[in-house]
Image (cartoon, grey):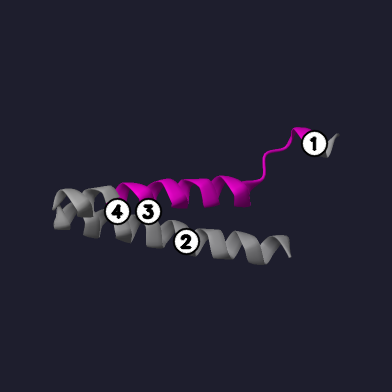
């Protein structure tokens, strides 16, 4: 009915991506390279979904 109560899926994905990248950077700083690689791969998947969602909204 009203559009203001809907959550923006692009904003949600962007926030999830940024949190994932921050966690990956923190793992890299601690020296956990395998954890960094896994988190970076997860972030890449989220980025892919983010780009698809942005295409759909424009």
Looking at the image, which residue sits at the far right?
A: 1
Mark found first going from the N terminus, 4 or 1: 1
Q: Is residue 43 left or right of residue 6?
A: left
Mark found first going from the N terminus, 1 or 3: 1
Q: How far separated are the C-alphas under marks 1 and 2?
A: 25 Å
Residue 16 in picture, x, y percent from top left: 47, 46
Q: How far separated are the C-alphas under marks 2 and 3?
A: 10 Å
**In the drawing, what numbered circle is on residue 4?**
1
Q: Which residue is mark 4?
A: 25
Q: Residue at x 54, y 52 (%)?
A: 14
Image quadrant where residue 50 sits: bottom right
In terms of secondary structure, where does tag 3 sit? Answer: helix
Q: Is residue 2 left or right of residue 55?
A: right
Foreground: disc 4 or disc 1: 4
Q: How far separated are the C-alphas under marks 4 and 3?
A: 6 Å
Predominant secondary structure, magenta span: helix
Q: Which residue is mark 3?
A: 21
Residue 57 in picture, x, y percent from top left: 71, 60
Label 2–label 3 contact, CB within 8 A: no
2 in relation to 10, above or below: above
Q: How far separated are the C-alphas under marks 1 and 3?
A: 29 Å
Q: Which residue is mark 2?
A: 47
Label 4–label 3 contact, CB within 8 A: yes
Q: Residue at x 45, y 52 (%)?
A: 17
At label 3, counting other C-alpha atoms closer than 10 Å, the crowd grade (few under 14, some 14-19, many 20 or more) is: some
Please tell me which residue lies in front, 25 or 58. 25
The C terminus, quarter of image? bottom right
**What range is drawn magenta here?**
4-25
């Amino acid at each position: 009915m009203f559009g203001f109560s809907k959550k923006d899926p692009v904003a949600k994905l962007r926030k999830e991506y940024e949190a994932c990248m921050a966690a990956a950077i923190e793992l890299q700083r601690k020296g956990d390279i395998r954890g960094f690689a896994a988190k970076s791969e997860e972030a890449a998947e989220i980025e892919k979904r983010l780009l698809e969602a942005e295409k759909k909204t424009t």
